[in-house]
Amino acid sequence: MNLRRGLFVLAAALLAAHFFRAANWSLVALSLVAPLLFFCRRRWSLILLQLGAYCASASWLAATLSLVQMRQQSGQPWSVAVLILGAVILVTLLAGWLLNSRCMLEAYPWSLER
């Protein structure tokens, strides 16, 4: 379970760095605060974290497509950028997907009654 949480924290930190580079301070703060939802042991928080991971993947995909288009127009190589950002997209997708595992769902019930 800690691996799943750690992978999500890594994905959130990478997203925060992406927004930091763009000077989007509110999204930097949101990216850094999002993993704190792990402390709320409810299913809705887990669903919200998954949704965040999938939205982050979409954001990375948009950034990748924009970067490739910009590099192609300027005649710069773009294949290494696609490989790196593709790996980031896969890590972020994996982080969201792993939050749907049985051990996570058992640890984050719909209600606190057991």
Image (spheres, grey):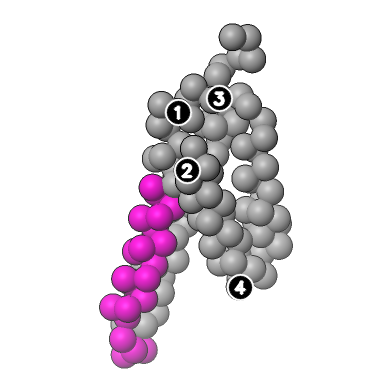
Instruction: Residue 4: give its label.
Output: 2
Q: Is residue 54 left or right of residue 108?
A: left
Instruction: Residue 108: give its label.
Output: 3
Q: Amino acid at mark 1?
A: Cys
Looking at the rendered structure, the secondary structure element under dot 1 is helix
Labels 2 and 4 touching (C-beta < 8 A)? no
- How far apart are the alpha carbons under marks 1 and 2? 10 Å
Looking at the rendered structure, the secondary structure element under dot 2 is helix
Q: Determine whether 67 is above or below 113 in the image.
A: below
Magenta part of the protein: which range? 73-94
Labels 1 and 2 touching (C-beta < 8 A)? yes
Looking at the rendered structure, the secondary structure element under dot 4 is helix
Looking at the rendered structure, the secondary structure element under dot 3 is loop
Q: Position of residue 52 (x, y in %)?
A: 53, 44
- Tell whether position 110 is magenta: no
- How far apart are the alpha carbons under marks 3 and 4? 34 Å
Q: Residue at x 41, y 62 (%)?
A: 88
The nearer-to-camera label among 4 and 1 is 1
- How far apart are the alpha carbons under marks 3 and 1? 9 Å
The residue labelled by disc 4 is 21
The nearer-to-camera label among 2 and 4 is 2
Circle 1 packing at 10 Å, graded few (<14), some (14-19), many (20+), is few
| Viewer-proximal residue among 97 and 18 | 97
Q: Is residue 113 left or right of residue 50?
A: right
Q: Determine whether 86 is above or below 2 in the image.
A: below
The residue labelled by disc 1 is 103
- How far apart are the alpha carbons under marks 3 and 2? 13 Å
Q: Residue at x 36, y 76 (%)?
A: 81
Labels 3 and 4 touching (C-beta < 8 A)? no
